[in-house]
Image (tube, helix red, strand yellow):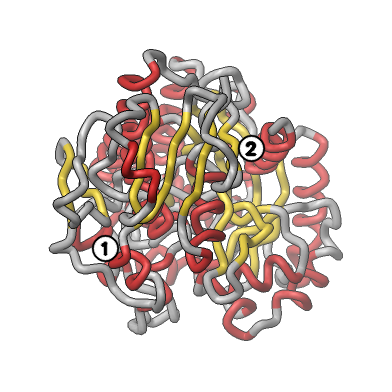
């Protein structure tokens, strides 16, 4: 039975509310229908009413025990009237979950059918990257630092906070309506999907550059004879890891997406052409690895045109070194007809930049509309674990941190997006290849499908068209 959503709120937040409803309720295998607030509330017995603190609907809240009420307060409207940081003192904790926009009006009886916080405003805050529009600080690459976010202040970057909000909402719905609304199945038939990917930032390095690369990473190199021999071999055989990784994935019934740059040294172009053709023929995905200068320089169109010389069938991208700001990136992605983005991660840590484990769209708060490029947020990057600029872990601790994150978050459902660079395997090769194989085996043993960003994009598109 469908659920009616009545939005009895001011026009100033109406588009934001519709956007949030469409995205956060998407994981449920049920129809949620936004209906006109002027229509009769008779008919469907399952209703969520999103209204202001002065709404006439609240007068009958205690008499309509089946209706679920979420309240948009005037103070929340004031907050979203301009870009500003959120006051972390204005938080209500529900079972250790920090809930933004708690109700302040004491006259409203919070109870069985009235939420104690505004789940739609709180979810919109994270889904839309609202806070990033108010952050002026930038790191050396022009990126917003994780330390300037509410996720960092509350220590929830590794928590899919919007999923936690949905769990709270599920509890209310189940108590009111007596049954649990099931979630959609993802590709593979389960509740979780792993979108696996690789960035091809470098195909190879000449001896001198490889020596410098090794020197920069010397503190992480395992000083044993076997590993040093492997590193010496890698001086002239780094390209072999294309085949090694591909073979490991096929062994475990997995495929992945490979993101290629628009420009490589002339001596590598033939290899890249061959690699792309081989990957496509084997069912792997191909994406554009946008130059780290393109977004800030507003040159994405020309960067894309150059990449089309390699491949013209791609539908998505990830930005090299994650150098972007959200609004400029998604404006340019829309202008250049990219279907999905796989860049939304703070490089400093594993986690959830938008607080949600499901693919979703972003909202453009400047033009008051939904962007039409789907966000597949990235959750895990190898460089985050081992790079000295970030967590800087040795391989043993990196593996432990990786598996702990996966264990803690796999049961939220949705998509877990994981990136391994091919040059990650140039150092401590046997150890890192073994870690990679253990990770794929972990998913295999749990019957979790490991596939491409393209597959999850088309799943989302097909499921959305059924509404």
Q: Nearer the viewer, residue 204 or 257?
A: 257
Residue 358 as seen in the image, left or right of residue 176: right
The part of the image, by quadrant, that contains residue 317 is bottom right
Q: Which residue is mark 2?
A: 456
User: What percent of the width, then of the height, locates residue 29?
Assistant: 56, 24
Mark in front: 1 vs 2: 1
User: What percent of the width, then of the height, locates residue 189?
Assistant: 59, 18
Number of marks in the rendered image: 2
Q: Is residue 240 above or below residue 293?
A: above
The reply to whether residue 241 is visible in this rendering is: no
Disc 2 secondary structure class: helix
Q: Residues within 10 Å of mark 1 (few under 14, many from 20)?
A: some
Picture disc at residue 100: none
Residue positioned 34% across, 61% down in the render: 387
The reply to whether residue 242 is visible in this rendering is: yes
User: What percent of the width, then of the height, locates residue 328?
Assistant: 58, 76
Q: Nearer the viewer, residue 304 or 40?
A: 40
Q: What is the quadrant of the C terminus in the image? A: top right
Q: Which residue is mark 1?
A: 150
User: What percent of the width, then of the height, locates residue 259?
Assistant: 65, 54
**How far is the residue under mark 1 from the one under mark 2?**
29 Å
Which badge, 1 or 2, comes first in the chain's sequence? 1
């Amino acid at each position: 039975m469908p659920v009616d959503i009545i939005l009895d709120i001011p026009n100033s937040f109406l588009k934001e509310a519709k956007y949030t409803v469409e995205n956060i309720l998407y994981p449920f295998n049920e129809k949620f229908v936004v209906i006109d607030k002027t229509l009769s509330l008779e008919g469907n017995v399952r209703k969520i009413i999103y209204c202001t603190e002065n709404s006439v609907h609240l007068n009958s809240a205690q008499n309509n025990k089946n209706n679920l009420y979420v309240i948009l307060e005037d103070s929340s409207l004031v907050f979203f009237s301009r870009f500003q940081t959120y006051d972390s003192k204005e938080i209500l904790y529900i079972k250790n979950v920090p809930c933004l926009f708690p109700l302040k009006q004491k006259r409203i009886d919070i109870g069985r059918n009235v939420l104690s916080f505004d789940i739609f405003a709180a979810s919109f805050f994270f889904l839309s990257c609202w806070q990033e529009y108010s952050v002026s600080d930038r790191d050396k690459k022009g990126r917003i630092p994780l330390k300037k976010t509410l996720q960092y202040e509350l220590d929830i970057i590794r928590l899919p906070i919007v999923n936690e909000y949905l769990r709270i909402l599920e509890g209310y719905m189940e108590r009111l309506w007596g049954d649990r609304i099931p979630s959609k199945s993802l590709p593979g038939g389960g509740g979780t999907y792993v979108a696996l990917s690789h960035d091809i930032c470098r195909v190879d390095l000449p001896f001198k550059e490889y020596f410098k690369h090794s020197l920069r990473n010397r503190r992480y190199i395992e000083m044993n004879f076997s590993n040093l021999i492997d590193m010496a071999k890698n001086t002239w055989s780094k390209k072999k890891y294309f085949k090694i990784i591909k073979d490991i994935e096929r062994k475990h019934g997995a495929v992945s997406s490979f993101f290629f740059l628009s420009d490589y040294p002339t001596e590598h172009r033939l290899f890249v052409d061959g690699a792309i053709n081989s990957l496509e023929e084997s069912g792997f995905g191909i994406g554009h690895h946008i130059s780290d200068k393109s977004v800030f320089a507003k040159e994405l169109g020309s960067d894309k045109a150059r990449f089309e010389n390699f491949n013209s069938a791609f539908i998505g991208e990830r930005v090299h070194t994650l150098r972007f700001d959200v609004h400029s990136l998604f404006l340019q992605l829309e202008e250049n007809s990219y279907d999905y983005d796989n860049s939304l991660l703070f490089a400093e840590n594993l986690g959830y930049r938008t607080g949600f484990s499901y693919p979703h769209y972003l909202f453009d708060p400047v033009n008051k509309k939904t962007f039409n490029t789907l966000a597949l947020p990235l959750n895990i990057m190898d460089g985050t674990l081992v790079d000295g600029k970030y967590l800087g872990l040795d391989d043993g601790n990196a593996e432990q941190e990786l598996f702990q994150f996966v264990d803690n978050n796999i049961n939220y459902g949705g998509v877990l997006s994981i990136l391994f660079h091919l040059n990650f395997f140039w150092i401590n090769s046997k150890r890192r290849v073994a870690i990679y194989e253990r990770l794929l085996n972990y998913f295999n043993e749990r019957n979790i499908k490991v596939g491409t960003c393209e597959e999850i994009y088309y799943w989302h598109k097909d499921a959305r068209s059924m509404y």
